[in-house]
Image (tube, rainbow, N blue to C red):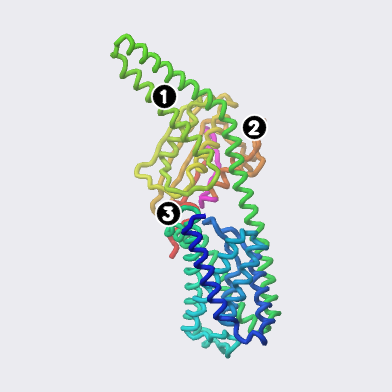
């Protein structure tokens, strides 16, 4: 831990202690049972948590309970309630190291104080709605809307600002990069939006039927949370399957790649030996030719190694992708393999193709799966002329790109077309049936579609459409 980070953690902790000491909960002797009860409510809300996509943190339903406690009991009591529930939840539920748990409790104390101060300045009583008359009627609640929006904004931005400094200094990343990643990611904004909208209904439920209202409110949320948790587990399993399929394909190609690399290295070593021999004889007429061959073979080795590294990358890395260049790299990657020896390549790549957002390694995996399947199908049927055609197109109005891969093989039996993307489906004697399924998951995870069809007298054709904005991006119709 760097000295700068240590000083920051100490400063945040001291500031939180000062606030807790100088601003105790009001009317503690009379309301202590309510404060304990709401501490348990906020603690229970912390059990409904997920890791955030930006990494380095979590999100939970705690923001709903925290800010509801602020509106109901005021900033002084809410500070204590939330700091204690956060500390215990970080230690016992999320199993975080003690220094991270204490920091989170300290920073949320400061956040609650600032958010509470904002609400008080905009009309919410210091003691909250339980210590003063709560709004009555629709008009009164609507009048509290500015205070609610300001409270949420203060809570979100100060919480992110305090946490981002610790994350940035502990991971050697830039502060504004961490803030940008955490605040601007579309999924994170959506994750926050729903819990904050639940704050007014929670307050109204408590005002109406007290703690029974809390139980009626949280029970369905817990059910929804458990369903969401199953979805997250399924999504993680799909990611693992995609990675496993990639590793299996890489292992299958390893021998052929090694053979081709050896051939290229033999050519490089041979030409280098000729250069040495000619230099010893002071014969320099063939230096240019030898050097050019070495350079060409070295570039082929570089292209294959880069393709292999992209293909092996485990994590999703969304970046700007030149689809035409990715197609060319993928073809160069597979061309030297034995199964493609008799294959002709027909590439028609669109001019002025814009870049799209996607993971180049995963998109390459889709292409390689389709190329390998096409080559194997043509080889099994002993097709006279083996051609793999690849087309790229751009639809400007729909802001999408289209990739079409077809072959001159036997095609897909009509009764099997509907099953090609199902797991375990394969027509190969030694196939495992996950190649096309993994390809389907990759394309859909990128917001696209993949369609299989037969072309009369030409073989199988796979058409992939991908939106330019990629996975998690804002669509052209979004506000």
Label of residue 464 in the image? none
Q: Residues under labels 3 and 2: Cα distance?
A: 37 Å
Q: Does 408 sit above or below residue 232?
A: above
- Residue 264 inside the magenta-drawn segment: no
Density class for disc 2 (Cα within 10 Å; few <14, some 14-19, many ≥20) is few
Q: Can you tell which mark lies on residue 428?
A: 2
* Closer to us: 380 or 330: 330
Residue ID at (59%, 43%): 242
**Depth check: 303 or 419 in front?**
303
Assess disc 1: are there few (<14), some (14-19) or many (≥20) residues with their C-alpha within 10 Å of its C-alpha. some
Q: Which residue is mark 1?
A: 297
| Vertical position of residue 345 compared to residue 60: above or below | above
Q: Is residue 18 left or right of residue 220?
A: left
As rendered, which of 321 and 285 lies closer to the eye?
Answer: 285
Q: Are the residues flagged by discs 2 and 1 in contact, CB closer than 8 Å?
A: no
State how far apart marks 1 and 3 are (Cα): 41 Å
Q: Nearer the viewer, mark 1 or mark 3?
A: 1
Camera-side residue of 2 and 397: 2
Give the numbered dot on residue 398: 3
Q: Residues within 10 Å of mark 3 (few under 14, many from 20)?
A: few
Do the residues bearing badges 3 and 2 touch, measured as CB atoms within 8 Å?
Answer: no
Estimate the x, y position of residue 221 in percent, counting from the top left. Answer: 65, 69
Q: Position of residue 234 (x, y in %)?
A: 64, 52
Q: Measuring 56% from the left and 82% from the top, which residue is drawn there?
A: 74
Residue 302 pos. (x, y %): 43, 31
Mark 2 to mark 1: distance in Å? 34 Å
Residue at x 44% of width, y 39% of height: 326
Label 3's element? loop
- Among numbered discs 2 and 1, the one appearing first in the sequence: 1
Which range of residues does the magenta coloring cover?
A: 445-460
Residue 122 visible, this angle: yes
């Amino acid at each position: 831990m760097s000295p700068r980070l240590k000083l920051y953690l100490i400063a945040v902790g001291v500031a939180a202690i000062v606030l807790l000491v100088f601003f105790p909960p009001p009317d503690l002797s009379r309301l202590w049972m309510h404060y304990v009860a709401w501490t348990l409510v906020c603690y229970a809300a912390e059990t409904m948590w997920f890791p955030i996509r930006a990494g380095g943190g979590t999100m939970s339903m705690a923001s709903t309970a925290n800010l509801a406690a602020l509106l109901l009991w005021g900033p002084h009591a809410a500070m204590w309630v939330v700091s204690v529930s956060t500390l215990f939840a970080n230690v016992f539920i999320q199993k975080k190291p003690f220094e991270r748990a204490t920091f989170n409790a300290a920073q949320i104390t400061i956040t609650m104080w600032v958010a509470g101060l904002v609400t008080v300045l905009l009309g919410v009583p210091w003691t909250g709605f339980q210590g003063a008359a709560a709004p009555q009627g629709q008009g009164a609640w609507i009048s509290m809307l500015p205070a609610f929006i300001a409270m949420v904004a203060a809570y979100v931005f100060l919480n992110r600002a305090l946490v981002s400094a610790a994350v940035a200094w502990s991971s050697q990343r830039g502060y504004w990069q961490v803030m940008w990643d955490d605040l601007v990611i579309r999924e994170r904004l959506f994750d926050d939006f729903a819990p904050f909208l639940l704050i007014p209904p929670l307050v109204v439920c408590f005002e109406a039927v007290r703690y029974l209202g809390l139980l009626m409110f949280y029970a369905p949320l817990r059910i929804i949370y458990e369903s969401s948790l199953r979805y997250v587990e399924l999504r993680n399993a799909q990611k693992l399957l995609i990675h496993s399929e990639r590793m299996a394909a890489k292992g299958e190609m390893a021998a052929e790649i090694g053979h081709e690399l050896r051939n290229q290295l033999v050519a490089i070593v041979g030409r280098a030996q000729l250069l040495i021999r000619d230099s010893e004889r002071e014969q320099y007429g063939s230096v240019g030719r030898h050097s050019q061959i070495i350079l060409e073979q070295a570039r082929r080795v570089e292209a294959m190694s880069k393709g292999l590294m992209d293909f092996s990358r485990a994590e999703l890395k969304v970046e700007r992708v030149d689809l035409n260049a990715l197609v060319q790299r993928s073809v160069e990657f597979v061309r030297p393999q034995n199964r493609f020896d008799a294959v002709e390549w027909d590439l028609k790549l669109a001019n002025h193709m814009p870049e799209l957002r996607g993971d180049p390694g995963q998109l390459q995996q889709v292409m390689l799966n389709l190329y390998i399947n096409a080559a194997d199908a043509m080889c099994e049927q002993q097709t006279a002329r083996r051609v793999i055609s690849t087309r790229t197109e751009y639809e400007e109005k729909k802001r999408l790109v289209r990739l079409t891969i077809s072959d001159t093989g036997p095609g897909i039996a009509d009764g099997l077309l509907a099953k090609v993307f199902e797991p375990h489906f394969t027509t190969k004697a030694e196939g495992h049936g996950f190649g096309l399924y993994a390809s389907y998951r990759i394309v859909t995870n990128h917001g696209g579609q993949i369609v299989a069809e037969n072309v009369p007298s030409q073989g199988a054709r796979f058409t992939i459409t991908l939106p330019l904005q990629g996975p998690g991006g804002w669509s052209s119709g979004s506000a």
